[in-house]
């Protein structure tokens, strides 16, 4: 993220803020985000579009998956997110997301089964 203003606009929405925290920690594909956040695929994709519009994510393709990561170039944004992660126990929803993040590799199976429907 190049601008604190963009960060604040994106972070004003709870779903997007949760995505920001996850993408700050790891590069994830849409199906992983869908499963970790327990959100629909269209909701995740719509929010990722907002990230792309503000150029706040980097992406790369690996096989049939596109992985997204947060592009946090602002020192104040990085400090804020690091502080959130250091105090994750104070944020139950974010802590739950982080616990599910540890299982991210199992969610690729969900991607594969969704593709085969």
Image: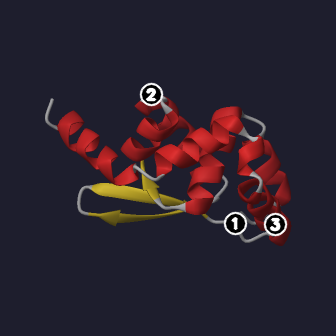
Q: Quadrant of the C terminus?
A: top left
Which residue occupies 78% across, 37% down?
Answer: 12
Q: Residue at 69% of width from left, 43% of height from top?
A: 17
In which quadrant of the rendered view does residue 13 lie? top right
Q: Circle 1 sits on which residue? A: 72
User: Alpha-carbon neighbours of circle 3 within 10 Å: few (<14), some, or many (≥20)?
Assistant: few
Relative to residue 65, is residue 45 drawn left or right?
right
Disc 1 crowd rating (10 Å Cα; few below 14, some 14-19, many 20+) is many
Q: Earlier in the sequence, mark 1 or mark 3?
A: 1
Residue to which mark 3 is pinned:
79
Residue 10 placement, left or right of 35? right
Quote the CA–CA distance across marks 1 and 3: 10 Å
2 or 3: tag closer to the N-terminus: 2
Q: Left or right: 5 with respect to 43?
A: right
What distance separates the C-alpha of mark 2 from that of mark 3?
30 Å
Marks 2, 3: nearer the viewer: 3
């Amino acid at each position: 993220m190049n601008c604190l203003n963009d960060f604040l606009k994106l972070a004003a929405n709870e779903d997007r803020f949760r995505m920001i925290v996850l993408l700050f920690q790891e590069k994830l594909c849409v199906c992983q985000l869908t499963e970790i956040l327990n959100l629909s695929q269209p909701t995740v994709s719509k929010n990722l579009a907002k990230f792309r519009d503000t150029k706040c994510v980097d992406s790369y393709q690996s096989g049939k998956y596109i992985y997204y990561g947060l592009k946090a170039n602002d020192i104040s944004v990085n400090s804020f997110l690091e502080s959130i992660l250091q105090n994750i126990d104070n944020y139950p929803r974010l802590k739950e997301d982080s616990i599910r993040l540890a299982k991210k590799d199992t969610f690729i199976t969900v991607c594969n089964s969704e593709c085969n429907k």
